[in-house]
Image (cartoon, rainbow, N blue to C red):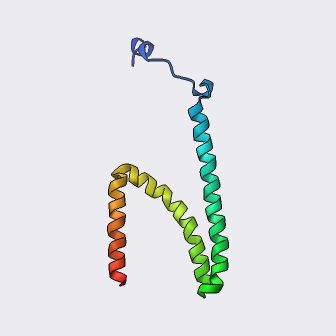
Amino acid sequence: MNKEEKQTLPPKKSYKKAPLMPVHLRVLVAVILGQIACGYALGISGTALSNAADYIKISDTWTGLIGAGALIGLAGSLIVGRLSDKIGRRRLLMMNMYFLAALLYCTS
């Protein structure tokens, strides 16, 4: 790249000096509320599972596995989110429905 090409490039924008807009506040509120909802769901599922274990008579191992399933699902959402961006959400949903239908058919 010669000197003439370097001079024609637009200057880089400084995002640190960007003004705070209402959309930024809405995104911040959405992220905070999402974290609160996620924490509530995990907390209430743990409480409900420990109380339900007396009634459904499952072992401590299964109680732990069911409780860990929620955390595994959260970690899996990182992978599935990127996958759905690549292949499309509709296609991924249909693949999920076919998989669950086949699983239901095989177990019955």
Q: Seen from this angle, which residue lies furthest front? A: 55
Q: Give the percent coordinates (x, y) of residue 101.
A: 33, 73
Foreground of the two, 107 or 44: 44
Q: Quadrant of the C terminus?
A: bottom left
Residue 54 vertical placement versus 24 (above, below): below
Q: Quadrant of the N terminus?
A: top left
Quadrant of the rendered image containing residue 46: bottom right
Q: How many marks?
A: 0
Q: Is residue 48 visible?
A: yes
Residue drawn at the location 39% of the way across and 49% of the way down: 85
Q: Is residue 58 visible?
A: no
Residue drawn at the location 42% of the way across and 13% of the way down: 8
Residue 43 vertical placement versus 34 (above, below): below
Q: Give the percent coordinates (x, y) of residue 9.
A: 43, 17
Q: Give the percent coordinates (x, y) of residue 22.
A: 59, 31
Residue 59 vertical placement versus 23 (above, below): below
Residue drawn at the location 49% of the way across and 58% of the way down: 77
Q: Give the percent coordinates (x, y) of residue 97.
A: 35, 66
Residue 19 vertical placement versus 62 (above, below): above
Residue drawn at the location 54% of the way across and 61% of the way down: 74
